[in-house]
Image (tube, rainbow, N blue to C red):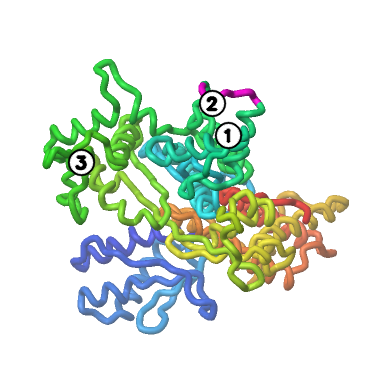
């Protein structure tokens, strides 16, 4: 939290200085300088301000430094001008030690905020059609959505995770017919299986269950039975993937359930848009006037034959979300839905909510790689490799960590063999091993009687120790970055860098030594490392084993 505290203080000091120079709402950045620069933070304020007031950057930097040293004497040890006008800052060691104490005392609450009461967030993700098991693309969406929800909850948001069940439409009729045909075939009937129907073995398994239970063809609702089995499989696979939803919402409830006047939620939503002038009748069809809100053309809500489009259900579903009290909607979709973004943004505005009330995150495809070569994404029968198969091969932890290695909008190569390696080449193993190594040191230290539980932290004076404490404190900066970008992938990069920093410390600084005072201080440092590693992995839905 050091960077956040420093930035807030500098914004106040430099903002006031800029205002005196005639510059309102002055914006600058506080960043960590390159590794070869001996400083904790670098500020570009003087260079940016000098351009606005037509002054020499180094002159402005000198004046700002005087203010910093005067008002931040308890925080900043040294401030100096670098290059054309950068301001390099050195933080006092006691500030670092105080943050270390905070990490140790707050543990899993470090960086957490009280419920902020500002927004009630609905995170809707996965939402795979209940026509078959989850594949690895769904897995990436699940990892991103669940981890982002964990981050937002840590930051005090009221977050609810929802799975939207697309159990309406032609695909469900095809699913029901697929099971029915397999049922008839297993009963000995010579019935051809349509080539455009669902081919997977799971269809046969559903049919076998129905036969074993003595269900007759006349009394069986094949759609209901198929959805029940497939949904149970999806829910089980997600649970094994450490993803559990707060709510499963059926499209059928808005498409078929009728109110006292015999109208569905879809009917009501379309009537609402028509009454506001955001929908209109043309050629016997009902059209959404989405072009005026940024879509490339208007869209059909209700066809001339009276059938609603999928978009009409989506309008009703988003209206339902707001009616349930959610103030911010987060939708996580595969990149193939990019053409749908503008029309849903238009819908939200038509429903009377600001565009910012909806955040749509698109994630790219996953490609499987084995031994450096593209791996088959489907079996000989044409079935996609399922999420369960990948979890069974590499484990839940590696699977989630690898899915989160890149930003959602970046295509991801998933190296199956690397994910299984028990070595530092494997990033998740590399990070988890830090926690295991630290716990090994703790176990070794238990027999010592000279350990001080309140050690003198000022003994942590090496460069490696200082860098490690700063990296631990950057946990809060990573939280803020995830919130700003609405992506949890920053934590994989952060944890890998933290592991790098820890290993450099471990190579240079012996933790258990004859110097009991120094040993006590370093044990506190690695206790903080364990806290942050466990917290960071927890936000990613990954375990932090104490032995490996």
Q: Residue at x 81, y 59 (%)?
A: 516
Q: Which residue in the protein does label 3 denote? A: 350
Q: Please, what secondary structure does the residue beneath circle 3 have? A: helix
CA distance for labels 2 and 3: 46 Å
Q: Residues within 10 Å of mark 3 (few under 14, many from 20)?
A: many
Image spot of residue 346 (x, y percent): 23, 47
Answer whether labels 3 and 1 touch (C-beta < 8 Å): no
Of the two numbered discs 3 and 1 in the rendering, the one whose residue sits closer to the viewer: 1
Residue 423 against residue 279 in the figure, above or below: below
Image spot of residue 80 (x, y percent): 43, 77
Q: Main secondary structure of the magenta part?
A: loop
Instruction: Give yes or no for residue 426 being in the magenta stretch.
Output: no
Give the residue at the far right of this rendering: 447
Q: Which residue in the protein does label 2 denote? A: 217
Question: On the image, which quarter does residue 314 sit in?
Answer: top left
Q: How many marks?
A: 3
Disc 3 or 1, which lies upstream in sequence? Answer: 1
Q: Residue at x 47, y 33 (%)?
A: 248
The boundaries of the magenta stretch are: 213-218
Nearest the camera: 321 or 58?
A: 321
Q: Which residue in the protein does label 1 denote? A: 183
CA distance for labels 3 and 1: 46 Å
């Amino acid at each position: 939290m050091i960077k956040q505290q420093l930035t807030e203080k500098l914004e106040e000091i430099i903002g006031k200085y800029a205002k005196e120079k005639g510059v309102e709402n002055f914006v600058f950045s506080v960043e960590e300088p390159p590794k070869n620069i001996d400083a904790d933070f670098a500020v570009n304020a003087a260079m940016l301000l000098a351009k606005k007031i037509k002054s020499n950057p180094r002159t402005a930097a000198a004046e700002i430094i005087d203010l910093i040293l005067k008002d931040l004497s308890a925080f900043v040890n040294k401030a100096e001008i670098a290059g054309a006008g950068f301001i390099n800052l050195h933080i006092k060691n006691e500030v670092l030690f105080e943050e270390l104490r905070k990490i140790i005392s707050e543990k899993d609450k470090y960086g957490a905020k009280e419920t902020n009461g500002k927004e009630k967030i609905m995170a809707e993700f996965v939402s795979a059609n209940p026509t078959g098991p989850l594949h690895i693309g769904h897995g990436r969406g699940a990892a991103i959505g669940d981890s982002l929800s964990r981050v937002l909850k840590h930051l005090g948001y009221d977050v609810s995770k929802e799975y939207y069940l697309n159990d309406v439409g032609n695909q469900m009729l095809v699913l029901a017919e697929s099971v029915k045909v397999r049922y008839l075939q297993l009963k000995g009937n010579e019935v051809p299986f349509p080539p455009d129907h669902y081919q997977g073995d799971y269809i046969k398994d559903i049919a076998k269950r129905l036969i074993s239970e003595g269900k007759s063809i006349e009394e069986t609702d094949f759609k209901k039975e198929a959805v029940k089995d497939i949904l149970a499989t999806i829910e089980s696979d997600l649970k094994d993937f450490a993803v559990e939803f707060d709510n499963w919402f059926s499209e059928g409830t808005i498409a078929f359930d009728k109110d006292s006047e015999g109208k569905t939620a879809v009917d009501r939503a379309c009537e609402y848009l028509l009454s506001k002038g955001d929908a209109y009748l043309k050629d016997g069809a009902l059209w959404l006037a989405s072009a005026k809100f940024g879509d490339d053309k208007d869209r059909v809500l209700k066809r001339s034959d009276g059938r609603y489009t999928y978009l009409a259900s989506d309008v009703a579903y988003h209206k339902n979300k707001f009616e349930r009290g959610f103030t911010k909607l987060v939708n996580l979709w595969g990149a193939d839905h990019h053409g749908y973004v503008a029309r849903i943004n238009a819908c939200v505005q038509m429903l009377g909510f600001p565009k910012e009330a909806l955040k749509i995150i698109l994630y790219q495809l996953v490609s499987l790689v084995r031994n450096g070569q593209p791996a088959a994404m489907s079996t000989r029968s044409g079935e996609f490799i399922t999420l369960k198969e990948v979890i069974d091969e590499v484990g839940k932890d590696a699977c989630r960590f690898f899915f989160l290695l890149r930003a959602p909008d970046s295509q991801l190569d998933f190296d199956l063999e690397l994910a299984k390696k028990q070595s530092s080449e494997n990033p998740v193993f590399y990070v988890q091993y830090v926690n295991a190594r630290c716990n090994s040191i703790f176990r070794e230290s238990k027999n010592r009687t000279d350990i001080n539980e309140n050690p003198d932290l000022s003994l942590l004076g090496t460069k490696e120790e200082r860098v490690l404490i700063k990296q631990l404190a950057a946990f809060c900066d990573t939280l803020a970055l995830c919130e700003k970008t609405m992506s949890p992938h920053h934590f994989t990069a952060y944890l890998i860098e933290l592991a790098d920093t820890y290993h450099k410390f471990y190579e240079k600084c012996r933790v258990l030594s004859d110097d009991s005072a120094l040993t006590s201080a370093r044990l506190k440092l690695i206790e903080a490392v364990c806290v942050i590693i466990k917290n960071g992995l927890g936000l990613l839905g990954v375990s932090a084993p104490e032995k490996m």
